[in-house]
Image: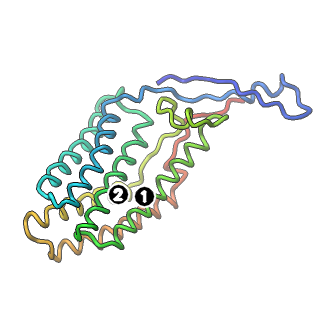
């Protein structure tokens, strides 16, 4: 990671440029986005639509195998980032949960289409994820040094904020994925009408709502802004 400073002069009417020049110094972080955990996250994102297609086509054996592979990449990227500091990045703090949300969204929609997850639960999951993704884009917009351009906004090398998931969010993601695994295995092992599976539906709905509330309540504490203005 490299700390880079840039000058953005803005001289209010009637002010002296000499007095305002120093207030326009902005720092932000430049980092290499091509880390192994980030590449694994991208692979998980690319795998999401394929899994959705296979579920809709009712290829549940293959879907379950690929979902297991996706889960393994999720565990692996976290392990690598924790073990080797050079593989940890601010981009990864946003990309990892984003990959999870994209994967979960594709899986829940396709499993609902296949009749394995109730539509109201999927709607709750999607609504919460859309809200979180919108919040991430808003944080990015507010922390990118002006002038904000599309090139700068979507440049993964310029990191402006680091995200920290709440405990409720971590628990919720785990339970959502457990429900996906159980739902994919249901037609394979013939337990689609299981009471246990239906109980997981209600638990997932509860943790999804609690997770959304935790981000709303602790929102500012889950974001660390990396770019600062120097006096």
Q: CA distance from mark 2 to mark 1?
A: 8 Å
Percent position (x, y) of residue 24? 73, 29
Asked whether, in this view, residue 69 is left or right of residue 32, the answer is left
Mark 2 and mark 1 in contact? Answer it, CB < 8 Å.
yes
Percent position (x, y) of residue 108? 30, 62
Residue carrying label 2: 105
Which type of secondary structure does the marked residue at label 2 adopt?
Answer: helix
Residue displayed at 76% across by 27% down = 9
Which label number is shown at residue 129? Answer: 1
For the C terminus, the quadrant is: top right
Question: Is 151 or 170 nearer to us in this picture?
Answer: 151
Percent position (x, y) of residue 85? 35, 29
Residue displayed at 55% across by 51% down = 220
Percent position (x, y) of residue 78? 30, 40
Which label number is shown at residue 168? Answer: none
Q: Residues within 10 Å of mark 2 (few under 14, many from 20)?
A: many
Residue displayed at 55% across by 43% down = 140
Which type of secondary structure does the marked residue at label 1 adopt?
Answer: helix
Residue displayed at 65% across by 24% down = 6
């Amino acid at each position: 990671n490299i700390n880079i400073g840039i000058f953005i002069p803005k001289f209010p009417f009637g002010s002296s440029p000499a007095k305002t020049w120093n207030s326009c110094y902005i720092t932000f972080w430049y980092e290499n986005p091509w880390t192994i955990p980030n590449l694994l996250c991208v692979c998980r994102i690319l795998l999401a639509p394929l899994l959705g297609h296979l579920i809709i086509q009712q290829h549940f054996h293959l879907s379950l195998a690929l979902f297991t592979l996706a889960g393994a990449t999720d565990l692996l990227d976290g392990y690598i980032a924790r073990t080797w500091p050079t593989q940890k990045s601010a981009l990864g703090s946003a990309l990892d949960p984003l990959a999870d949300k994209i994967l979960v969204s594709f899986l829940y929609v396709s499993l609902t289409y296949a009749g394995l997850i109730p539509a109201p639960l999927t709607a709750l999951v999607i609504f919460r994820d859309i809200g979180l993704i919108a919040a991430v884009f808003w944080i990015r917009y507010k922390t990118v040094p002006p002038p904000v351009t599309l090139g700068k906004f979507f440049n993964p090398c310029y990191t402006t904020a680091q995200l920290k998931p709440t405990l409720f969010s971590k628990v919720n993601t785990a339970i959502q994925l457990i429900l996906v695994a159980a739902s994919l295995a249901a037609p394979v092992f013939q337990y689609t009408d299981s009471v246990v599976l239906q109980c997981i539906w209600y638990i997932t709905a509860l943790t999804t709502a609690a997770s959304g509330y935790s981000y709303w309540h602790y929102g500012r504490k889950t974001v660390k802004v990396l770019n600062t203005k120097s006096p």
